[in-house]
Image (cartoon, rainbow, N blue to C red):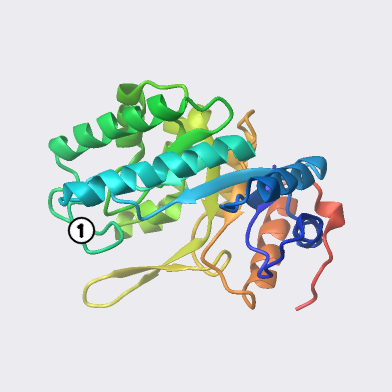
Amino acid sequence: MRLGGPVFKESKDPGELVKLHQKLGYSAAYCKYIEDPYEREEYKHAFKEADIVLAEMGAFCMNISDPDLNQQEKAIKMIIKRLEQAEEMEALCCVMHGGSYNNNGCVQAHFDNFSEKNIEHNIHVIQRIVDEVQPKKTKLVLETESYVLPDNPKLYLHMLKEINREGFAVHLDPVNMVSSPRRAYYNGKFIKECFETLGEYIVSCHAKDTNLIDHATTQITETYLGNGILDYGTYLTELNKLSQEPPLMIEHITEEQLPKALNYIFNKASELGLIFKHLKKREIVNL
């Protein structure tokens, strides 16, 4: 398996960035958006030579269902530009959000987000984006969420089939779909459902965690990897079964939390008899 995540150090030297990834035990990396074409080529070459996969380029918070049609078109063109660069960089995927009828900045919850009208609109827009770029090495994917499309694996599969494009695939973030106490308590069962439904189409995954706080009304909160109740035994076991080797990308974590998270995920994999690529290059941090 491949693991990737943040390195918390900015550098324009691709070689230095590669070494930072290796020290953390990563064999996958987030794909930076780089304006300069020469810098893009250097970056791509350095990571490829080190066998560190560029897992995903972000095209988040670009609202393809914005009620303001000018803003909607602007968002679509921005996603097209990101997908074009992801394809040039040979990233595995370019991750976008499903559209929201709320136009207050980034995509947000709205009553009509899950309407048939919005599902159809998203399908047509994604077809347009993929048809315009015609990616061969990169897949356009949707970030799974609880408040925008798609919020469950069956809906994701439906959209995948309707979009019907080789350039469109699946990105899995189970934490983002843990939206009820039932799903939180039985998240291992839900994770298995995700892989059974979408497994062959998954190109990248996110790693973080979830907690459930018992108030008069239950609150479900996101936390950093290893600090919650997500069933990583099931997550890693199911991920390891996939022949296409989707990388697991740590996100939403601080520099101080990262060593704990890495110790947790590597120890969990070891308990399961699973191995992350290039783990021997990791510099172990004692906590």
Name which quarter of the figure residue 283 lies in. Answer: bottom right
**Front position in the image: 221 or 167:** 167
**Front position in the image: 271 or 204:** 204
Q: Secondary structure at mark 1?
A: loop
Query: Can residue 186 be seen by looking at this rendering?
Result: yes
Name which quarter of the figure residue 211 lies in. Answer: bottom left
Residue 257 lies, with reference to residue 141, above or below; the image says below
Quadrant of the image for the C terminus? bottom right
Q: Is residue 238 left or right of residue 112?
A: right
Three-letter code, disc 1:
Asn
What residue sits 15% from the left and 35% below the top? 116
Q: Is residue 252 left or right of residue 216?
A: right
Query: Can residue 238 be seen by looking at this rendering?
Result: no
Residue 269 x, y percent position in the rendering: 70, 51
Q: Decide: few, some or many residues near mark 1? Use Cα within 10 Å; few <14, some 14-19, many ≥20.
A: some
Residue 230 x, y percent position in the rendering: 49, 58
Q: Which residue is mark 1?
A: 103
What residue sits 65% from the left and 35% below the top? 245
